[in-house]
Each structure stands twice: as structure tokens, then as C-alpha cells.
Amino acid sequence: MKGIALLLTATALIAAGFRLDTAAPPRSRISLPRGGREAPAIGERAAVFLWVLIPWTLTWFGTQALGRPHNAFGTALPFERHWPVWQWTEAFYLSAYLFIPLGALLLRTRGALRYFAVTGTVATIVVTICWLTIPVVAVNRPFEPAHALGRLLAFEQGHSIGVAAFPAFHVLWALIGADAWTFDARLSGSRWSGAFAWTWALLIAASCLTTAMHTVIDEAAAILVFLLIRRRPSAVPAATWTTSSTAPPSGPRRPSRPARRAP
């Protein structure tokens, strides 16, 4: 019952966020931004936590609370079952829990924040359906903890029943976050943040394999979902894509001359 209650709560929050997002003006202060280059308001940032990140967290805990399915199976390929566990990369794996909320807190434009929120919501719906219908569980490779990060990794693995592993949401959120920062850089005219975000996201994705928390197939599924739902123009008005260096002049347009006919 606990798992079902958590999943229903997540569904209700997503539905409430969608209703506020599609409501006619005046809009609620705690609703997703509509797009543009302006800085998001505090209420718009809070809306991303309330209607997107909290429901995503609830779906993970709800799936965990439902327990392991009786017909569960792992997705590890033969060649990766003997890979070593690089315990120090647990630092990058855990950094996903910082990278994701930082996007909601620090993205500088409403357009990028809306893309982050809308794509994250769609990802939550798609991946939760996969978690509930495909009985994949994580089968972690064994290792002996050698230091604090190794003990932390062992603790994390020991307190999970292995469900909610396919597709790998660590990878999917990292890709969504990096793409949102790239979009934000285009809207704000600052390129370095996109490159930094992609570097961080790739380290998170790699750590999912080096810590044995996910498999190659789990990651491939996450990348596929990302490519299928990555539709920025549908999440952000097209006008916000134009950078200041290529924006049309604000004055009246001159009438075009009629084309001359060939003699």
C-alpha cells in the first residue's frame, strides 16, 4: 500500500503542475515558466521542485516500496560481469543528487528552466511506466570496500532492492540537465556553462558503470529515452531560440522588391 500511495501522490502532483501550467491568466506564482531569456522568478524555481523533482523522487521510492517482482532479471552482459568496481567513482555517482537540483536553482533563463522541467516530467512518466512493467533489477558486482567512498557505495547498494534500474534515471537526468545548461548558454550568451555541464554529466554516466550500479543496457535505454523526448522547440516558444547576435531589428521591415522577370 505504501508504494501505491507514493505513486498516486506523485501522479497527483504532476497533474496539479500540468493544470497550473495550462491555466488561463492570471497564472499562479508557483507554476512553470513560460519561456524566454528572462531570469526565472523564485516561484517558478519552486514549481520545478514541487511539480517535477519531488514527484520523480516519490516514484523511485514508490517503486522500491512495491518490492522485487517475482520474474525479475538482470541486464548485465557477459563481458561486463567481470569489470572491476572503481570505488572512488562513487563521488561522481553521488554528485548527480547535486547536479539535478542545481539546474532548478541556477539555470539563468526561463526558457532553459522550462525545458528542464517539461522534459524531466515526461521522462518521469515514461521511465516510471518502464519500471513498473519491465521486471529488471540491478545485479551489482561484488567488491570489498577499501575506503570511505567504497563503504558509502556498499551502504547504498545494501539499502536498495535493485528495482527502478532500467532505464537508468541517473543517466537520463544527467543528460537532461546538461542539455538544459547548453540551451541556457545559448539564450544567455555564455558558452562555458554548457561545456562544464556536459563534462559533469558524462562523468555521472560513466560512474554508473564503474560503480556497478547500472549496466550498459540500462544506460543505452536511458540514452534512447532521452533522444526520443528531447524536443526543445515543443517545450519553449520558438522566439526564445534567437540569440541577441542574430535577432532581427526592432524597427519596421522594409517592403521587399518584386522579382524582375527575365527578358
Image (tube, rainbow, N blue to C red):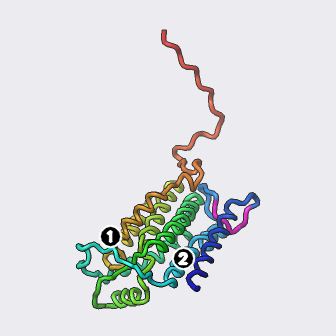
For label 2, count other residues whose C-alpha is less than 10 Å away and answer few (under 14), some (14-19) or many (20+): many
Outermost residue toward the right? 26
Task: Residue 83: give x, y in percent of width and height.
Answer: 24, 78
Check disc 1 and give the amino acid type. Answer: Val
In this figure, which residue is indicated by the disc labeled 1?
216
> Which one is in front, 228 or 203?
228
Outermost residue toward the front? 71
Q: Is residue 80 above or below residue 228?
A: below
Residue 59 bears which disc, if any?
Answer: 2
Quadrant of residue 161 within the rendered picture: bottom left
Task: Residue 255: give x, y in percent of width and height.
Answer: 62, 26
Task: Residue 1: give x, y in percent of width and height.
Answer: 58, 85
- Which secondary structure class fits the magenta region best? loop
Task: Residue 259: give x, y in percent of width and height.
Answer: 54, 19
**Residue lying at 53% horizontally and 62% vertically, measured from the top left:** 119
Check disc 2 and give the amino acid type. Answer: Thr
- Ranked by sequence position, the earlier of labels 1 and 2 is 2
Quadrant of residue 104 within the rendered picture: bottom right
Number of callouts in the render? Answer: 2
Q: Is residue 199 left or right of residue 52?
A: left
Magenta span contains residue 9: no
Q: Secondary structure at mark 1?
A: helix
Q: Is residue 190 left or right of residue 54?
A: left
Q: Is residue 146 visible?
A: no
Q: CA distance from mark 1 to mark 2?
A: 23 Å
Q: Is residue 35 above or below residue 107?
A: above
Specify the segment rendered in magenta.
27-33
For label 1, count other residues whose C-alpha is less than 10 Å away and answer few (under 14), some (14-19) or many (20+): some
**Residue lying at 29% horizontally and 81% vertically, measured from the top left:** 86
